[in-house]
Image: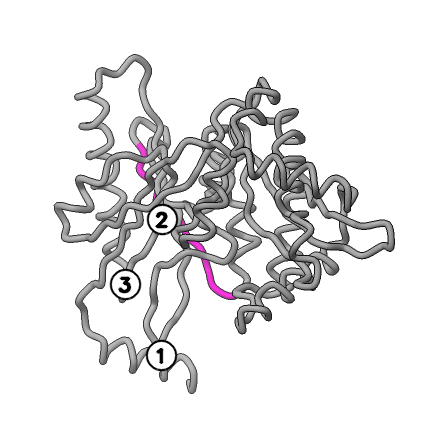
Amino acid sequence: MDKDKYRELCKQEKTIPIFQKDWWMDAVSIDGDWDVKLYETGGEIVGALVYYTTERAYKKVVTLPPLTQKNGIWIRYPQNQKLATKIAHENRVIKELLNQLEEEKLYSYNQNFDYRYKNWYEYYWRGYNQTTRYTYVIEDLTDLKKVYDNFDSNLRRNIRNAEKVVEVRRGLDIGEFYELVKETYKRQNMKVPYSMEVMRKVEENCSSRNCREIFYAIDKEGNIHSAIYIVWDDESAYYIIAGSKPEFGNSQATSLLIWKAIEYSASYVKKFDFEGSMMKNIERFFRSYGGTPKEYFSINKIYKYDYIYELLRYFYKKYK
């Protein structure tokens, strides 16, 4: 089975980002399912398309799983390829993977790709749509003084002020962390878009591999102001979730937490990825950390096939 082969590949291949790892997809697919298409030549896997599916209005769709901003295609490259040869190689691999995917009876497709993925020719030729999005990445954590000096001056002031109010600690219980996240969404009259079960599974899978940490800010009275959750792979750390109490919003604790997470990440990886947002206020906040803006693709398509057949198939499965 492709999944079994892919699991073995994930054990060996360090260039596969964390959000495309089999164990990550296991954790975030509790409310849906995930699968993978493989392209092999000469007995070697040279391409993989990892994707998550769920049902919406009785239709099977490919979409982003919870807590996963990016996944998609991974490609193995032969050494010393010329640029033209590299692009031809990518086109061939992507074509084969999409041929397999499009054999499935899918209603729609929507994936965000890692910013290192630059080629969407084959998708374009097949009528897919692409929107460019951005994340901010601090590309070199080896000189933390240089990193800090590159922060916006207002951000540095907020960090200094927060240090007078709170202490940063690590290792908050995942249940407490999730309650903070719930408060953040409640303040916006929204529900958390992922369950506690998904959060616990992510925590379980990441902590067993020593690739996550929770940072939280606590004051002298024992009040937790905010907390953030980061994960990392062999190349980069990723800031993926934050939670805070609204009554302590002026303490600037989150600004301090992110800085401490950046410092901590430097012991493991070279890069720090803010897992960017296109929301104006969040973009401005992330930009203040002095990272480099990185373009990444959001690719989507609505397929055309027999919707009536799929509806009948759904009721058959439900009532048989």
Q: Residue at x 34, y 67 (%)?
A: 60
Specify the amino acid type for callout 1.
Tyr
**Residue 269 image position (x, y, % from top left):** 57, 26
The span from disc 2 to disc 1 (Cα, nearest Å) is 28 Å
Residue 160 appears in view = yes
Specify the amino acid type for callout 3.
Ser
Query: Is the residue marked by circle 3 packed among few (<14), some (14-19), or many (20+) residues within 10 Å?
Result: some
Mark sitting on residue 112: 2
**Residue 308 image position (x, y, % from top left):** 22, 80
The span from disc 1 to disc 3 (Cα, nearest Å) is 17 Å
Q: Image height check: is 30 above or below 111?
A: below
For the C terminus, the quadrant is bottom left
Q: Which residue is mark 3?
A: 108
The span from disc 2 to disc 3 (Cα, nearest Å) is 14 Å
Q: Nearer the viewer, residue 241 or 90?
A: 241
Identify the magenta region. 31-40
Write down the quadrant of residue 260 in the picture. top right
- Eye-nearest disc, 2 or 3: 2
**Residue 207 image position (x, y, % from top left):** 69, 43
Q: Secondary structure at mark 3?
A: strand
Mark sitting on residue 314: 1
Specify the amino acid type for callout 2.
Asn
Query: CB under 8 Å between callouts 2 and 3?
Result: no
